[in-house]
Image (tube, helix red, strand yellow):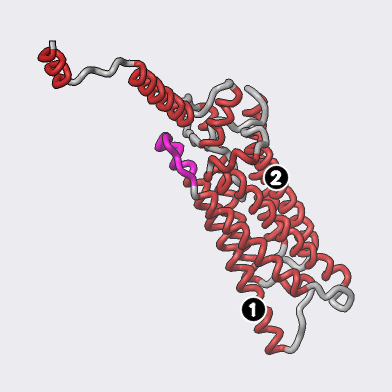
C-alpha cells in the first residue's frame, strides 16, 4: 500500500545509477513487507503462534510506513522541497504528496491498533481496557488505506505507453481491492464481537478481539498487496529499461516551473503575456509617432483659396 514508481519525469533519489538503485530498493522492501504481513496474519490461525504473529504484524506495518515516508521524501526532492509549488500542480498535491502521507498515517494507526491488542494480551483486560480503542484504530487505519488507494488511482497521463498503463493499473487495482478487504474485515470483526458480547455477556480482550473473519480477510488482503508489490517491481524494471518516448510522463506546472527557475527562465505563459504586451506597446508608440494625414476636404479648400 504505497505510491511506488512515480510517473514523474523527475523523481530524485539521486543521480544516474543511484536513483535506479533506490527505486529497486523501495519496491523490493515493500514486497518484503507484504510477505511479513501475510505471515503475521497466517500466524493468527494458530493460538500457539498468535502472539508472535502480532509482533510480525507490527514489524510489517512499520516497514510499510517507512516505505511510504521514504516515497514522500523522494517526491518532494523532485521539487527541491518547495511546497509552495503544489499550488501550480493539483496532481502533485493530491497524488504524490497526499498519498504517501495518508498511507503512512493509516499504517501508523493500524500499528497502534495491533499494539493495543498485544498490550491487552500481555497485561490482561483488568489492567488496560484498550479493546474499544484497538478495534476503532483497526478500522480507522484501513479506511485511510482505502482513501490513499483511491487517490493513487487518480493519475492523469498526458503521454504514456499502453504497456506501462496496463502495468500501472495492475499495481493500483490490487492495492485498492486489498484495502477494501481490510476495511470489511475490521468492520465485520467489531460487529461480530459486539454480537458475541451481547449474547454471551462476556467482554473480549487480547487475541480474542481478532476474529476469524478479520484473519481470513487480512490474509486475502495481504495476498493482494503482495501481488501489487510484485507487479510494481516489474513496472519499475520496465520503466528503467524503456527509452524516453515510451516512458510515461506527468507534465505538471510545479516541475516545469522549477526547471525554468533553475535555468533562469520564466514560464511559457508569462513569457507569452510579456511578448504580447511588448507588441501592443510598440504598436501604440508607432501610431503616436506617425504623422497625422490631412483630410482630402481640407486640401481642396486650401487650393481654392490660392
Q: Nearer the viewer, residue 101 or 16?
A: 101
Q: Position of residue 178 (x, y in %)?
A: 57, 57
Q: Is residue 130 left or right of residue 19?
A: right
> What is the number of the mark on residue 192?
1
Task: Please rate how many residues cluster around mark 2, counting C-alpha atoms within 10 Å: few if below 14, some from 14 to 19, many from 20.
Answer: some
Image quadrant assignment for residue 158: top left
Compared with 96, 249 (above or below) is above
In the picture, the quarter occupied by the C terminus is top left
Tell me the element at label 2: helix
| Residue positioned 67% across, 36% down in the render | 81
Determine the residue located farthest toward the left in the rendered image: 304
Q: Is residue 59 left or right of residue 231?
A: right
Q: Nearer the viewer, residue 212 or 252?
A: 252
Marks 2/1: CA distance? 34 Å
The range drawn in magenta is 155-168
Q: Nearer the viewer, residue 29 or 251?
A: 251
Q: Position of residue 205 (x, y in %)?
A: 78, 75
> What is the number of the mark on residue 69?
2
Amino acid at each position: 500500500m504505497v505510491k511506488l514508481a512515480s510517473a514523474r519525469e523527475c523523481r530524485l533519489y539521486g543521480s544516474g545509477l543511484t536513483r535506479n538503485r533506490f527505486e529497486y530498493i523501495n519496491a523490493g522492501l515493500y514486497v518484503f513487507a507484504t510477505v511479513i504481513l501475510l505471515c503475521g496474519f497466517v500466524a493468527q490461525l494458530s493460538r500457539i503462534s498468535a502472539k508472535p504473529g502480532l509482533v510480525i504484524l507490527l514489524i510489517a506495518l512499520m516497514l510499510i510506513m517507512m516505505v511510504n515516508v521514504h516515497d514522500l521524501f523522494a517526491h518532494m526532492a523532485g521539487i527541491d522541497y518547495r511546497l509552495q509549488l503544489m499550488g501550480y500542480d493539483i496532481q502533485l498535491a493530491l497524488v504524490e504528496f497526499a498519498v504517501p502521507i495518508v498511507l503512512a498515517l493509516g499504517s501508523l494507526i493500524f500499528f497502534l491498533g495491533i499494539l493495543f491488542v498485544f498490550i491487552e494480551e500481555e497485561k490482561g483486560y483488568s489492567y488496560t481496557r484498550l479493546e474499544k480503542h484497538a478495534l476503532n484504530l483497526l478500522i480507522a487505519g484501513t479506511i485511510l488505506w482505502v482513501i490513499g488507494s483511491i487517490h493513487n488511482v487518480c493519475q492523469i497521463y498526458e503521454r504514456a505507453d499502453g504497456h506501462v498503463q496496463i502495468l500501472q493499473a495492475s499495481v493500483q487495482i490490487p492495492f485498492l481491492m486489498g484495502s477494501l478487504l481490510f476495511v470489511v474485515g475490521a468492520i465485520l470483526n467489531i460487529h461480530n464481537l459486539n454480537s458475541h458480547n451481547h449474547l454471551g455477556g462476556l467482554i473480549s480482550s487480547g487475541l480474542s478481539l481478532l476474529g476469524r473473519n478479520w484473519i481470513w480477510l487480512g490474509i486475502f488482503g495481504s495476498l493482494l498487496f503482495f501481488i501489487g508489490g510484485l507487479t510494481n517491481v516489474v513496472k519499475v524494471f520496465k520503466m528503467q529499461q524503456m527509452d524516453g518516448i515510451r516512458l510515461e510522463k506527468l507534465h505538471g506546472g510545479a516541475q516545469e516551473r522549477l526547471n525554468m527557475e533553475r535555468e533562469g527562465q520564466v514560464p511559457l505563459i508569462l513569457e507569452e503575456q510579456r511578448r504580447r504586451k511588448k507588441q501592443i506597446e510598440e504598436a501604440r508608440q508607432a501610431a503616436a509617432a506617425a504623422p497625422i494625414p490631412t483630410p482630402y476636404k481640407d486640401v481642396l479648400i486650401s487650393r481654392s483659396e490660392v
